[in-house]
Image: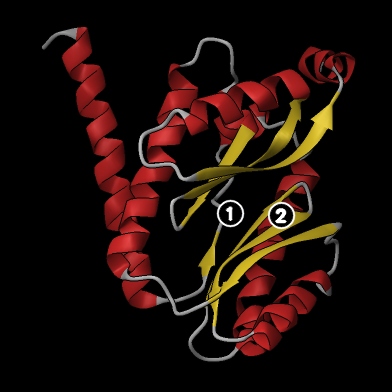
Amino acid sequence: MTHKSIFAASRMAVLAAAVTAATLLGACAPLLVGGAMVGTALSMTDRRTSGAQLEDQAIELKAINRVRGAAGGGANVSVTSYNRTVLVTGEVPTQAARAAAEQAVAGIENVRATVNELAVMGSTTLAARSNDAILSSKVKAAFIDAKDLQANAFKVVAERGSIFLMGRVTEREGNRATELARATSGVGKVVKVFEILTEAELAALQAK
């Protein structure tokens, strides 16, 4: 098998896994949590401190019950925490539920800021969620392919065809990532939820 064939196969495997995960999550629980287990390799190159990584996981876990109770039935809410800034996406049935979900997240210990991107509308279909999972994987793959980006400096969230980008990045990195995401087939819009670093701050982080 050629190098190109191996690379293509691996990309297809990533997309297939994303679809499977989205299908299982959509069938089992309307509330999705954006965080993942912190692996050793990724943890070492993450631009957050190890303490912040653990806090982000804790915030996402605490949000499960709080948001479910606050938003009520018919809500489909995703919570993604990065360096204690929390992005809330998905769909809720009423404006009151939208406000209640935001308040529930904002009240969690260690949350520094809340970005409420909830839409007041009916929940998306399983097919739409599967498409979002594929879209997120395509954007992540574009970041990996890029030679001028550190792909794991970004957290990518897809919702109804929109891409939300989180991370501690420089303005240069943020603009480049946004450009790549916008160029990805199927992406409707890109929303930046960045914590901007100076080039000097980034150099200091990399030196550590």
For residue 6, above or below residue 22: above
User: Mark on residue 56?
Assistant: 2
Q: Can you give x and y, in whole percent of width and height, for residue 67 in the image?
A: 65, 79
Q: Can you give x and y, in whole percent of width and height, for residue 133 in the image?
A: 38, 51
- In the image, what residue type sits under mark 1? Gly
Q: Earlier in the sequence, mark 1 or mark 2?
A: 1
Q: Are marks 1 and 2 in contact (CB under 8 Å)?
A: yes
Q: Nearer the viewer, residue 54 or 202?
A: 202
Residue drawn at the location 34% of the way across and 61% of the way down: 128
- In the image, what residue type sits under mark 2? Asp
For residue 194, side relative to residue 160 (left or right): right
Q: Can you give x and y, in whole percent of width and height, for residue 7 in the image?
A: 26, 19
Residue drawn at the location 67% of the way across and 24% of the way down: 175
Q: Can you give x and y, in whole percent of width and height, for residue 65 in the image?
A: 62, 82
Quarter of the rendering occupied by the C terminus: top right
Residue at the front extreme, as displayed: 188
- Please count the marks in the image: 2
Q: Quadrant of residue 194?
A: top right
